[in-house]
Image (cartoon, rainbow, N blue to C red):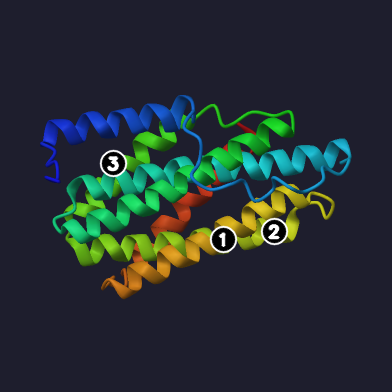
Amino acid sequence: MTKRVYSPVDELIIGFDKALSAVFSNENRPKRENPAGGLEEHALEQSERRRSAGFMRVNHAGEVAAQALYSGQAFVARDSGVRKSLLRAAAEESDHLYWCEERVTELDSHVSCLTPLWYLGSFAIGAVAGLSGDKWNLGFVLETERQVVAHLDKHLERLPEKDQRSRSILEQMRADELQHATTAMAAGAAELPKPIKVTMRYCSKVMTTTAYWI
């Protein structure tokens, strides 16, 4: 079978379609079953429900940003192997996106109203990172995943104890993000300079704090 080669215009259209799906409606069913699927829904106090919903809204925003980052990086990646790795990670982030959105709905809440902003800003950052070269592209993935894992650890500590459905989702996401970091390191990721890491943490803090409430 002849492998189809997409033109830059084709890639742009495909990327635009993915952006619309991520921002406005994650209608595509995930490839993997929701980790919370078989778990009982325990009654939560109103304050606990609000807290869980806030955390899952933040994680949904983070998954929108991750999908955009990887798509932006893949769009400009020079090496086909790096591009495939990035797109594979983006596909897994799509699963996370759906699980988070589903959980936010179960908690009678909503995803962030600023979702389009998170996507556009992250895609631009990803494209800029990708233009710096593949080893830095992968280094950006590595540092992103390290920071995401640290962020998930904090949420797992602060989730209401009875909210096992949210916890199971975050634990699976954490395992996937660690795998993405391991893959990036094995592929030759460069260690980012400290000022860039600090800037990334600051940008992440702005997004997560805002998305918790809006």
Foreground residue among 96 and 127: 96
**Disc 1 to disc 3, how far (Cα)?**
25 Å
Label 1 Cα crowd, 10 Å radius (few <14 / some 14-19 / many 20+):
many
Tag 2 residue: 156
Label 2 Cα crowd, 10 Å radius (few <14 / some 14-19 / many 20+):
some
Foreground residue among 170 and 50: 170
Residue occupying image coordinates x 73% and y 43%: 52
Q: Position of residue 53 (x, y in %)?
A: 70, 38
Mark whose residue sits in front, 1 or 3: 1
Foreground residue among 26 and 56: 26
Q: Is residue 207 visible?
A: no
Establish if 9 lies above or below 47.
above
User: Could you say whether the residue bearing mark 2 is in a helix, strand or loop?
Assistant: helix
Residue occupying image coordinates x 14% and y 38%: 6
Residue type at numbered disc 3: Ala
Residue type at numbered disc 2: Leu
CB atoms of marks 1 and 3 within 8 Å: no
Q: Position of residue 1 (x, y in %)?
A: 15, 46
Mark whose residue sits in front, 1 or 2: 1
**Disc 1 to disc 2, how far (Cα)?**
10 Å
- From the viewer's perspective, is 114 left or right of 5? right
Establish if 71 lies above or below 144.
above
Tag 1 residue: 174
